[in-house]
Image (cartoon, helix red, strand yellow):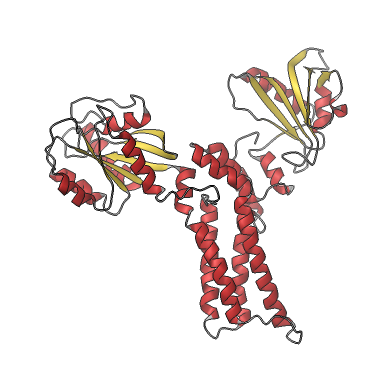
Amino acid sequence: MEMDTIAAISTALGEGAIGIVRLSGDQAIAIGDKLFKGTKRLEDTPSHTIVYGHLMDDASGETIEEAMVTVMRAPRTYTREDIVEINCHGGLVSVNRVLQAVLAKGARLAEPGEFTKRAFLNGRIDLSQAEGVIDLIRSKTDRAMNVALRQVEGRLSKKIGKLRQDLLETIASIEVNIDYPEYDAETMTAKLINEKMTIVLAEIEALLATAKQGKVLREGLATAIIGRPNVGKSSLMNSLVHEAKAIVTDIPGTTRDTLEEYVNVRGVPLRLIDTAGIRETEDIVERIGVERSRQALKEADLILLVLNYAEELSKEDEALFEAVKGLDVVVIVNKIDQTGRIDMERVRQLAGDNPVVATSFLQEEGVDQLEEAISRLFFAGGVEGADLTYVSNARHIGLLNQAKAHAEEAIAASLTDVPVDLIQIDVTRTWELLGEIIGEDVQDSLIDQLFSQFCLGK
């Protein structure tokens, strides 16, 4: 099956100007020629050119579709196989008719991610670059897209490759010292192992230092908006979404359930969760909403705690500060357009190191400052840079943490009387774990699992 010619719809399903059916494999051009009728056969078409014609049903003589067909010959293609892309009219019926015609002529329907899987298996990209393709497709902000694009371009792969080469040279020197001590080779002492592994460890730690920001960009932040009833939680959500998603009234307890919406705040993707006001209530429906609010609080990465500038701090407010202690919190004092009764000194005392922002969502004041506070909380000091390689994938982070542990073991052992050949075990394991990131040493089951996450046609 790995050598079959595969086909799939590569554009999103639905109405559109153009739909694309992609074929890849050694029979892609031959299958295309069985359907395509134009001024010349696809077989005679130069690589990386597009030709106009019609797709015809040989049996009935009917026209299936009008199309522009692109021919790309191996190895200068996405999969390093021959690729044919049929550009037809968009729409469910049109694109499906073309796909069914292609399958009837001998192509096999591609599995999810199989085009990218072939690119990996044929050596065009490594595993980390393939995973970057998923992130690129799923990007919710420009900043997330830039990070994914750098991974697709191989920036992480190059760093990992250099680390593995350094480790391989270290391992080779150890082997020479152990197996051929009579040769006048470089003596691989514990001191030298310590020096080389310390450099590798520093590089691994530098990559892991970007993991928090990278994971935020890749997955977004589960952001819970909490506060007492009628402090402006729904108004906050509407301000960030720039749409009236939540009902806003002066009546406490209007929000009875959690509302969710994705927003882009200064390049940080937030999954906003507008919760019911947390308070004791006899209303059974509101009580269920309050319980869901407490659950959202436990699962959130970021808390937006909203207070009312026009009211004194209550016991419920102080209880909320206690509930979010130790979490990433932005404190929002809303309704500054009204007469102030809140003790701001006490608010800052309770907030501690967390930012405090004054707003009036009714007057659209303070929203920019709020967005800046959220951005700084996760990207303090402008960590985003053109030369920075982010680690955002949970699999990569896990493998880097394991590699870090083995590098630390090797360094610790080098400071004792542990024999060099035993230290080599940790050095080798560090090399292997880094190899798993780029797919140099990885199981087939993991490869299948990773590519199954792709959409059809990619």
Q: Is residue 74 above or below residue 178?
A: above
Instruction: Using the image as rendered, state which of residue 377 and residue 10 is in the foreground.
Output: 377
**x%, y% of residue 68?**
74, 21
Horizontal relation, residue 450 to residue 295: left or right: right
Q: Is residue 376 above or below residue 67?
A: below
**x%, y% of residue 299?**
35, 46
Q: Quadrant of the N terminus?
A: top right
Q: Is residue 340 above or below residue 179?
A: above
Q: Is residue 385 visible?
A: yes
Horizontal relation, residue 71 to residue 279: left or right: right
Give the tally of numbered discs: 0
Q: Is residue 453 above or below residue 349?
A: above
Horizontal relation, residue 87 to residue 193: left or right: right
Q: Residue at x 64, y 40 (%)?
A: 113
**x%, y% of residue 77?**
75, 38
Instruction: Using the image as rendered, state which of residue 98 and residue 197 is in the foreground.
Output: 197
Q: Quadrant of the C terminus?
A: top right
**x%, y% of residue 106?**
79, 30
Q: Is residue 453 visible?
A: no
